[in-house]
Image (cartoon, rainbow, N blue to C red):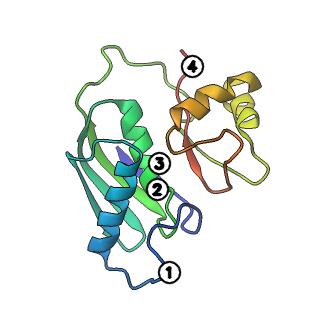
Amino acid sequence: MGLISFIKSAGEKIFGKSEETLEKEKAELIANHIKKFGFDTSTIQVSVDDEKVSLTGSIDTIENKNKVIVTAGNVDGISSVNDQITVTNPPPVEPPKVEKQFYTVKKGDYLSKIAKEVYGMANKYDVIFEANKPMLKDPNLIYPGQVLVIPPLQ
């Protein structure tokens, strides 16, 4: 749990052209954005304060929690996500810690380059791709500023 930073101007444009969108409306738009990727948002509350999204409630797995966080944060106009989501089915044994749990894409990055950096093996790019579905639909379509979930290798 905690505050995860994002680049405000990078991400999916779901707020429309008006900066005047009310924060309650922004929260509803983000909740619908999360839901469109197939995540159960019935126990997650979304609130927006200027550029910060706060997520509270519970979700079934740590993997889904991380995906919901990056889905909410990778929205144009959002610079941070305050994660207050609890996991209802935590893993029975603490998984090995990865040095990075999230990765912010830089200009010139591609999934195999990121995999080489975080895992030491470029051919593990598919692990990162699978961990970020359904947000990612194609392993070749990532953009600078996008935040990705980096799962531990199993």
Residues tagged 3 and 2 counted as in contact (Cβ below 8 A) = yes
Label 4 and label 2: CA atoms lie apart by 24 Å
Label 3 and label 2: CA atoms lie apart by 5 Å
Q: Secondary structure at mark 2?
A: helix
Identify the residue position indicated by label 3 in the image. 70
Residue 50 lies, with reference to residue 38, above or below; the image says below
Identify the residue position indicated by label 2 in the image. 73
Q: Quadrant of residue 91?
A: top left
Q: Is residue 7 left or right of residue 39?
A: right
Residue 84 lies, with reference to residue 27, above or below; the image says above
Identify the residue position indicated by label 4 in the image. 153
Please tell me which of labels 4 and 1 falls first in the chain. Answer: 1
Three-letter amino acid code at the position of disc 4: Leu
Q: Which mark is residue 42?
A: none
Label 2 and label 1: CA atoms lie apart by 18 Å
The percent position of residue 130, horizontal first and vertical second, equals 55, 30
Q: Quadrant of residue 38?
A: top left
Q: Nearer the viewer, residue 105 or 20?
A: 20
Label 4 and label 1: CA atoms lie apart by 40 Å
Question: Residue drawn at (39%, 50%), measured in percent from left and top?
Answer: 36
Three-letter amino acid code at the position of disc 2: Gly
Q: Secondary structure at mark 3?
A: helix
Can residue 99 be seen by looking at this rendering?
no
Can residue 37 be seen by looking at this rendering?
yes
Which marked residue is nearer to the observer: mark 2 or mark 1?
Answer: 1
The percent position of residue 19, horizontal first and vertical second, equals 45, 83
